[in-house]
Structure formats: structure tokens, C-alpha cells
């Protein structure tokens, strides 16, 4: 019995950790209505292209809240660099929206979308 436990506990632990580390693409999917990053980015692009800066500012806050929910789920299965880069892109987006700079806002959103797509790969 002792030999069985000595062998099985490390194997089960390793299998569990491997499953956690490979679950990023599953965990980043939307669970509710308020954590859909892809949809939030698309809505932000539409507001920025139409020049609706007040709505874009509100939706940036919603994007940030959604990201904070999702980052708790994917933090163990994604690279820390990718998570930090997404935060930086949202910060750049906030600054570009404050300056009402359409081109920099779109650049920051597209960069954030690329980081989002790269999570869990």
C-alpha cells in the first residue's frame, strides 16, 4: 500500500498540474454576459470609429472589469508576460481615449485583441 501511495500521489499531482496549465483556452471563454472580451473590443472599435468618446470611455471601464474577472481564471495557465501586455494595452487605450485620438485608440485595441487571441495557445 505504501509503495502504491508513493507512486500514485506524484503521478496524480503531475497530471493535475498539467491539466491546469493546458486549460487556458477553455478558461478564457466567456461564462456570463459581462466577461466577453472579444465582444467588448468590437463594441469599443465601433464607438471609436463613430467618434462616440463618452461611450468608449464607459466601455473601456467595462473591458477592464471583464479582464479582471478573466485574469483570475487564466493566471495559472497563461504566461505572465501576455497578461501584463494586455493590461498595458488597456492603459494605452485609456490614454488615447482621454486624448480623443482615434488612430492610437484603434492601435491599442488591435494590439489588445492580438494578446487576447494569444492567451492559452
Image (tube, grey):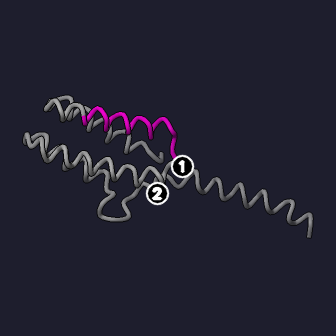
Going by the image, does 49 lie left or right of 107? Answer: left
Q: Residue at x 29, y 64 (%)?
A: 33
The spot of residue 44 in percent (x, y) is: 19, 46
| Residue, disc 1 | 77
Which numbered marker is on residue 59?
Answer: none
The residue pinned by badge 2 equals 27
30 and 121: which is toward the camera: 30
Give the number of callouts: 2
The location of residue 109, given as percent across then percent down, is 26, 38
Please name the residue shown 14% across and 46% down the image: 46
Extreme residue toward the bottom, this view: 1
Question: Is residue 92 positioned above or below 65 on the image?
Answer: above
Measured from the top left, where is residue 66 in percent x and y?
Answer: 34, 53
The residue range painted magenta reads 76-94
Find numbered disc 2 in the image and state the secondary structure of the residue it sits on: helix
Tell me whether circle 1 and circle 2 mark residues in contact (CB < 8 Å).
yes
Secondary structure type for disc 1: loop
Q: Is residue 81 magenta?
A: yes
Amino acid at each position: 500500500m505504501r509503495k502504491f501511495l508513493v507512486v500514485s500521489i506524484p503521478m496524480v499531482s503531475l497530471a493535475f498540474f498539467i491539466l491546469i496549465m493546458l486549460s487556458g483556452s477553455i478558461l478564457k471563454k466567456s461564462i456570463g454576459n459581462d466577461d466577453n472580451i472579444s465582444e467588448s473590443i468590437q463594441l469599443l472599435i465601433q464607438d471609436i470609429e463613430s467618434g462616440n468618446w463618452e461611450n468608449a470611455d464607459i466601455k473601456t471601464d467595462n473591458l477592464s472589469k471583464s479582464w479582471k474577472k478573466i485574469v483570475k481564471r487564466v493566471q495559472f495557465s497563461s504566461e505572465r508576460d501576455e497578461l501584463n501586455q494586455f493590461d498595458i494595452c488597456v492603459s494605452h487605450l485609456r490614454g488615447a481615449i482621454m486624448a480623443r485620438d482615434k488612430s492610437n485608440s484603434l492601435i491599442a485595441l488591435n494590439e489588445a485583441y492580438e494578446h487576447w487571441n494569444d492567451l492559452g495557445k
